Image (cartoon, grey):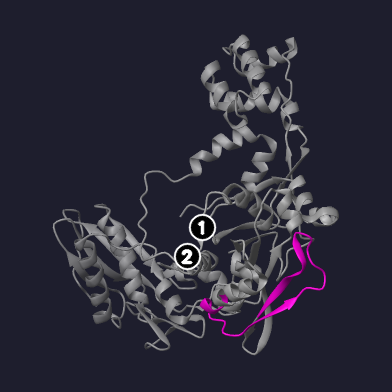
Amino acid sequence: MAAFDTGEIKSKGKGRFTEAWLDTARLIPRGTSISLTGKGKPHLVRDLIQRSRQILLDLGFDEAENLTILPEGDVVKQYGPEARVILDRSFYLAELPRPDIGLSARRIARIKKIAETADIPRLQSILRKYKKGEIEADNLTEEFISALGITDYQATEILEKVFPEVKKLQPVPTDRTLRSHMTATWFHTLAALQHKVSFPAALFSVGQRYRNEQREDAHHLRVHHSASIVVMDDRMSLDAGRQITTAIMQQYGFADVRFETKMATSKYYAPEHEQEVFVNHRGTWLEVADIGMYSPVALANFDIKYPVFNAGFGVERLGMLLYGVDDIRRLVYPQFSVAEYRDEHMAESITYIAKPGTDRGQRIARAIEKTARRHKDAIAPCEFLAWGDKVCEVWLVEEEAGKKLIGPAGFNEICVADGTIYSDIVPSGMPTGINYMHAIAAGAAAAIERSSDALTYQVKGVKHLSDLNLEIPEAVRRHIEKQHKKIGVGGAVFVTIEARPVGGHSGRTSRE
C-alpha cells in the first residue's frame, strides 16, 4: 500500500520545490490496475438537485442557465440605494496583473546557468506575448519547454529563481462579483427572452450562490445551491405565485404551506410583494423559501416590460429537513460528515491483505486450514504434510517440544457487535465467516503460489488485524476510534508453514 510521508515531503518542498516535485514522482505506484466493485453512491445534495429539476420540469417549467459573474452595477440597478448593503455580502473578483519582465545581463547569465542552450531572443518574444495576453498564464511553462528546447525542470527553475516578480504578484480588484442570489442574473435572461417566448414564460435554474458570510457554521455556507423560478406574464400576480409555490412544496412532501409578508421588502421586489414561505415539518413551522413580484423599477432598469414572479428555494436547507440533518456542513462536505457503519457493513469491510489468485493457490489454502484443524492439538516436535504437487510440498511445523502444533486461539472467529471487532471461540454477534487460521492460510498460500523457492510463513502472536493477514478501510478504522470502540483481536496462535521445493532435500515425513 502506498502511503506518503507527508511531513518529509512538505519539508523537502519548502526547501527546494523543483527537486522535491521531481523526486517524489517515484512514490507514485506504476503498472497497477484497480477494479471498482458495486454501485457508486450519489451525493445527497446532487440527488436533491436532480429531484428538484424533475419536480419543476414536471410542473411545466423550462430549464435555463444563468450568468455566474456580473458587474456590481447590476446589483445597483436592482436594489437602488440599498445596493451597497447588499454588495457587502458579495465576493468581488480580482486579477493578477501581468508583469513586464525584462532580461538584464545578470538574468541572462542565471538562465544560461540553469539551461545553457536556452534561446534568449525566443524567450524575450515569449515574455512579450505573455505580457500582451497572447499566451495564457497556465501555458507559460509549456511555451518555455517547447520554444526554448528545455526540460520541465529547467522551465520551473527559471520561473522560480530568475523571475521572482511572478511570485510577488498581488491581485488587483475589479467591479465583477459572483452572484450572491440567483435573482441577480435572472434579469439578463428575462430581458433576452421576453420577445422570444410565449406567455406565461416559466423558467427555472438550479445553481450555486456565493455569499460572503462572516463564518461558516451549522446553518451557513459561503457556497450553496438555489432552485430558483421565474414566471413572466402580463397577468402574473403574487396570488398566482403562491399557488405555484404551494404546488411545488407539495411535490417535496410538505402538505401544509403558509406565507408571511416580510416587514422590510428587498428593493428589487415591489412594496409588500415579498413573502417568506413556511412549511409544517413534524409539527414545527420552518422557513424554506422566499417569493415575490419584481419591482417595476428594477425591471425597467433592464428594459423588461412584463410582470415577473420569483421564488427561490435553498437546496441545502430543504435537504436538512428532508434528510434529518442538523448541520448543513455534514450534509454537504465529506470532511464534516460522519459515516455511519452498521455491524454488517463493518463485517463486510474486513478483507485479506493477500489471498491466492489461482485455483492452485486456493486449494493450497484449503489444505493448510484442513490439516491445521485435524492436527491442531498434536504435541511438538511435529510436522504434517498439507499439500504436495510437482512444484512444492507444504508442511505445518512446530519444533518447540511440548507445544501444540497450533496455538489455542488458532481457530478463533472474527466477529462484530455493537461497533466493535473482536474474536470469539464460536461465531457470535455478526460473524464474518473468517477464523484466524483461514486468514493465515490465505496469506501463506498467496506467498507460496508466487514462488518456487523454499519459504517459511510464520505467525507468532496476534495483536492487530494485520498479524492475521486482514485489514479494514481507514474510514472504518477511524469510525471505530471516534465511537470509542475497539478492534479486539489477539491471542496465542504460533503457526509455522513451510514450503519446500520438490527435488530439494526434505528427508521429512509426518511425525508427532
Mark 1: which amino acid? Glu
Q: Is residue 192 left or right of residue 96?
A: left
**Are the two marked residues, 2 and 1, in contact with CB atoms closer than 8 angstroms?**
yes
Placement of 473 over or under 85, stated as above or below: below
Q: Nearer the viewer, residue 153 or 362?
A: 153
What residue sits 63% from the left and 46% below the top?
A: 8
What residue sits 77% from the left and 62% below the top?
A: 215
Mark 2: which amino acid? Leu
Is residue 481 something that shows in the picture? no
Query: Which label sits on residue 484?
Result: none
Q: In the picture, which quadrant includes the N terminus?
A: bottom left
Q: Is residue 105 left or right of residue 426?
A: right
* 2 or 1: tag closer to the N-terminus: 2
Q: Nearer the viewer, residue 128 or 471?
A: 128
Q: What's the magenta region?
A: 249-278
Query: Which label sits on residue 57?
Result: 2
Placement of 98 over or under 70, stated as above or below: above
Residue occupied by mark 1: 63
Residue 240 horizontal/vertical position (percent): 61, 72
